[in-house]
């Protein structure tokens, strides 16, 4: 059986492009699960596979509990007093192990191992895909619409990676069909109980507007122009405040582009959202005046206590 285990690990590693360590972890869990099914009570089991020759040892485990009363789970717990008879100096929370006969591979055991191994391999594949996508968090990515329901849209990022675009993260009045290309901001990778890690994307976040300008305006990407603030009413209107670190460069003109080409490219991506490029100013009153253009401001009242203007 040892040679078969090594062969299985190598085959799965090559076929699924998963590190051998992950395959061995899955095999150990599969063997442990098969072993537990041989016992009438819910015991704790650990299996250690020798990665060189494929042989494996099985250990029954008990968690040390500091209690004077009855144990909650005698099959997998041992009192501190009893544990110290054979293990002097052991503390509560430690684990006591005893080697037991390893399970033999009969038909039921093989089926159990196959089910556990299949699930663990799927989890390992998903974990690897998620790991490869982490570097794209906070950036705009291209995706393809895969399927959608009333609440979410599932999009394909390529490389076996899928992401979720919730309905409230889609710009109002936008409609997409299966196979449509779409740009999104990869917002975060969120782990939910029972679902595992999920890639969450958005099209309504102010950061999406910011990243689109970073793509369209080279001066922003080169850190010559700095985005100081963004505000959006998705699909309707947006304002972006900018300043230049080089006095020779007009930040508004650079963001608007020749004949408005740059700001229009961003607007078109956002379903025609009207975008105002505002000149940032250290003087709050002047900043507000710039933000209100083309309206003329006759008077500004600042209430510092309520943080209102």
Image: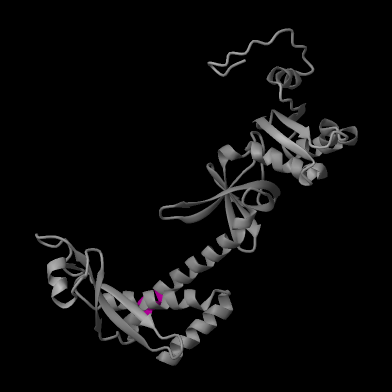
- In this view, the residue in front, 226 or 52, is 226
Q: Main secondary structure of the magenta part?
A: helix
Residue 94 among those drawn in magenta = no
Query: With 307 as the anchor, is 180 left or right in this view?
Result: right
Measuring 31% from the left and 87% from the top, which residue is drawn there?
104
Measuring 59% from the left and 39% from the top, which residue is drawn there?
169
Name the quadrant containing residue 75: bottom left
Residue 112 among those drawn in magenta = yes
160 versus 17 height, above or below: above
243 versus 50 height, above or below: above
Q: Which residues are magenta?
A: 111-115
Measuring 53% from the left and 16% from the top, which residue is drawn there?
306
Task: Residue at the far top: name it.
Answer: 298
Image coords of residue 201 (percent x, y): 60, 47
- In this view, the residue in front, 6 or 152, is 6
Measuring 81% from the left and 42% from the top, which residue is drawn there?
219
Q: Quadrant of the N terminus?
A: bottom left
- In this view, the residue in front, 41 or 28, is 28
Name the quadrant containing residue 263: top right
Q: Quadrant of the C terminus?
A: top right
Task: Residue at the far front: name it.
Answer: 89
Image coords of residue 46 (percent x, y): 32, 76
> Can residue 37 be spotted in the picture?
no
Query: With 297 as the anchor, is 111 left or right in this view?
Result: left
153 versus 286 height, above or below: below
Image coords of residue 284 (percent x, y): 68, 20
């Amino acid at each position: 059986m040892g040679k078969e285990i090594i062969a299985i690990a190598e085959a799965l590693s090559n076929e699924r492009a998963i590190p051998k360590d992950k395959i061995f972890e899955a095999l150990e869990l599969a063997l442990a699960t098969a072993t537990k099914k041989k016992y009438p009570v819910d015991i704790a089991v650990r299996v250690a596979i020798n990665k060189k020759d494929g042989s494996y040892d099985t250990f029954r485990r008990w968690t040390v509990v500091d209690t004077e009363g009855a144990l909650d789970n005698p099959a997998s717990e041992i009192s501190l007093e009893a544990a110290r008879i054979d293990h002097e100096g052991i503390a509560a929370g430690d684990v006591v192990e005893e080697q037991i006969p390893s399970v033999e591979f009969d038909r039921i055991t093989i089926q159990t191992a196959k089910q556990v191994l299949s699930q663990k391999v799927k989890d390992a594949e998903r974990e690897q895909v998620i790991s490869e996508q982490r570097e794209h968090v906070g950036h705009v990515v291209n995706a393809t619409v895969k399927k959608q329901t009333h609440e979410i849209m599932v999009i394909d990022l390529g490389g076996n990676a899928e992401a979720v675009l919730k309905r409230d993260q889609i710009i109002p009045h936008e409609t997409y069909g299966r196979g449509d290309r779409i740009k999104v901001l990869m917002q975060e990778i969120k782990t939910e109980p029972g679902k595992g890690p999920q890639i969450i994307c958005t099209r309504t976040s102010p950061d999406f507007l910011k990243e689109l300008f970073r793509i369209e305006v080279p001066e922003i990407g080169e850190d010559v122009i700095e985005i100081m603030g963004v505000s959006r009413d998705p699909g309707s209107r947006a304002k972006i405040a900018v300043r230049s670190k080089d006095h020779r460069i007009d930040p508004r003109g650079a963001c608007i582009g020749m004949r408005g080409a740059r700001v229009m490219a961003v607007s078109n991506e956002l379903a025609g959202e009207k975008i105002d490029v505002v000149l940032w100013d250290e003087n709050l009153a002047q900043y507000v005046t710039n933000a209100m253009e083309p309206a003329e401001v006759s008077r500004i009242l600042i209430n510092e206590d309520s943080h209102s203007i």
